[in-house]
Amino acid sequence: MNLNELLDGLRSLVRGLDGSTIAAADAARLVDQFSEIERLAVAGRTLATRRVQETKAWRSSGSPSIVAWVAEHSRASFRHAAATINMAMRLEQLPATKEALVSGNLSERQASEISAAAELDPAAEHDLLRMAERESIAALREKCRDVAAAAAGDENARERIRRSRYFRHWLETDGALRLDARLTADEGAPLLASIRHRADVLEAEAHRAGQVESAEAYAADALVSLADGAGAPKAVVHVHVSQSALARGRTEAGETCHIPGVGPISVAAARRLAAGGSVKLLEMGGVDVQRVVHAGRTIPAALRTALETRDVACAVPGCNKRRDLEIDHIVPVADGGETSLDNLARLCRWHHAQKTHHGWRLEGPPGERQWVRARAPARLGG
């Protein structure tokens, strides 16, 4: 069967689907199958795109560039087309990532993130592929970002990003204004902190008035408020930095300098921000937090910093919530659980409630965690 026959069969299949009559189990299976088809289609399109680029076949169409040609034929934006071309070129040097993509094991986003990081540090490729099997896109993206920053060099990476900085805006069909920006992490972090700080104030005021909207809506209001000077006082950005790296002026293997929820920055950038008064440096000294064990529920500062650094988002696999996280003892203190890094995790409120009241729990070490039901929930009145 050739590709044209496959396409005809797929069109016929999709046209015949009736979403209102598909059994629940069949619907779930179809989602998995169509997702795999989508991943395989991305792989095929990526390989074919590279060949069109190599042979310059796009020139016969009258398109001004390969990016314009790909955008037209894939019905995508120029930005997405350029990303496809860049990924196709990177895959030539990354056989393991290419194999995972053509096998249908990677999504386009996963392959793009991994190839961009592994191009700078090929030794990280296999670890990133293993991570893609079990972690969320958000967690994978953060790891790839860390790999790329470490490989490129702190200040070199920052300068490369700064040279490509931009701010864009456009109107959508319904008249809505959309914004898009590319900034270095240290330049963007104070802006994000100010927006989040103001959004929290607006959300609290709205709740007192009995009005409830999404966190994203209040963040949008906060951004608008910055323009008229109605914003709250400048928020402080916390940077977690290894004490030795701060003294030296740069990070080395095993050391950190990053803004939780934003990403790694150079020690030089942290120093510049601190000098401007918008950043508080939280020095992580020589304390081995893996060995810190505290009696009771109180969490020492060094342990809390390490936990916030590790669990930027809810520790439940697939949950990317980053706001209002609560610290949980995986094995409760009442059951003999220690207040140690291995026995602590940050959970969103919903998952924390699921663990506390409905028998769910985390199992496995960080990076290999699973969210499982340890016991059946108690029946009301039982």
Image (cartoon, rainbow, N blue to C red):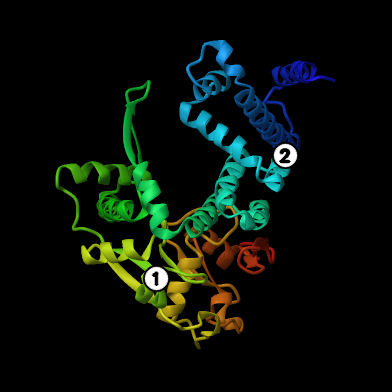
The answer to whether any part of residue 214 appears in the image is no
Q: Residue furthest left?
A: 229
Q: Name above or below for residue 310 compared with residue 76.
A: below
Front position in the image: 291 or 229: 291
Q: Which mark is residue 104?
A: 2
- Judged left or right of residue 218, residue 361 is right
- Given the current orientation, which residue lies at the most extreme bottom position? 295
- N-term mark: 1 or 2: 2
Q: Nearer the viewer, residue 120 or 10?
A: 120
SS assignment at label 1: strand
- How crowded pointer 2 is (Cα within 10 Å; few <14, some 14-19, many 20+) is rated as some
Q: Is residue 267 left or right of residue 55?
A: left
Q: Residue at x 71, y 26 (%)?
A: 21
- The label on residue 241 is 1
- Quadrant of residue 234 within the rendered picture: bottom left
Q: Is residue 140 above or below residue 7?
A: below
Residue located 68% across and 34% down the image: 43
State the image quarter where residue 20 is shown: top right
